[in-house]
Amino acid sequence: MADNGIATCPSCGTKNRTPVAATGKPRCAKCQADLPWLVPADDSTIAGALDASPVVILDLWAPWCGPCRMVTPILEQLSEEYAGRLKVVAVNVDDSPGAAAKFDARSIPTLVILDRGEVVERIIGAQPKPVLAAAIDRALASR
């Protein structure tokens, strides 16, 4: 996932800090391009991470989970393709049991798509990129 909230601008290559919680959307400090927004969160930061205005994908994962490791690069690609319209929040369920319980993560990976803080879709298990992109498109179309 994201390197502790550091995003590389796809336009100019500048490294930018992306906050876990913020209003609006992150932009490159150098060229003002929309940045991919991938942030780690835990039980203490998840509330702020999910209050963003763009569509949010909450990735409930664990480091020992093989399917979770398959989904991570797909989510990274999607965050670049949907820069400015999507935020990816990754929560390690081993370190954050409260978030796992709140979002009913009985199996991982569990992806929860939220729009303005409301759950609009849940995806259980590793899915290919077209399936995840279609779910994002549905959430964006309902705005």
Image (cartoon, rainbow, N blue to C red):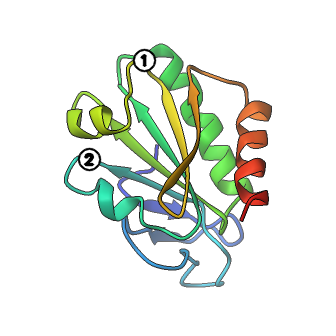
Q: Which residue is painted at 60% across and 61% down in the image?
A: 36
Q: Quadrant of residue 80?
A: bottom right
- Residue 104 image position (x, y, % from top left): 37, 30
Q: Which residue is mark 1?
A: 107
Q: How many residues crowd around disc 2 within 10 Å: few (fewer than 14), some, or many (20 or more)?
A: many
For residue 107, what is the image quadrant? top left
Residue 78 versus residue 29 in the image, above or below: above
Identify the element where label 1 is drawn. Answer: loop
Mark 1 surroundings within 10 Å by alpha-carbon count, few (fewer than 14), some (14 through 19), many (20 or more): few
Task: Give the residue number, with chain letter if any, for mark 2.
Answer: 42
In space, the residues marked 1 and 2 are separated at their CA atoms by 18 Å
Q: Position of residue 112 (x, y in %)?
A: 52, 40
Image spot of residue 26 (x, y percent) = 54, 74
Please tell me which residue is depicted at 74% across the width and 55% down the height of the picture: 81
Say which of 3 and 24 sits in front.
24
Q: Amino acid at mark 1?
A: Ser
- Apparent side of residue 76 relative to residue 90 in the rendered image (left or right): right
Q: Earlier in the sequence, mark 1 or mark 2?
A: 2
135 relative to 131, above or below: below
- Is 12 displayed left or right of 96 in the figure? right
Residue at 31 percent of width and 33 percent of height: 100
Q: Which mark is residue 55?
A: none
Q: Quadrant of residue 55?
A: bottom right
Residue 136 % position (x, y): 71, 48
The image quadrant where one finds the C terminus is: bottom right
Marker count (numbered):
2
**Residue type at tag 2:** Asp
- Residue plotted at (54% across, 34% down): 72
In the structure shown, which secondary structural element does the residue marked by tag 2 occupy? loop
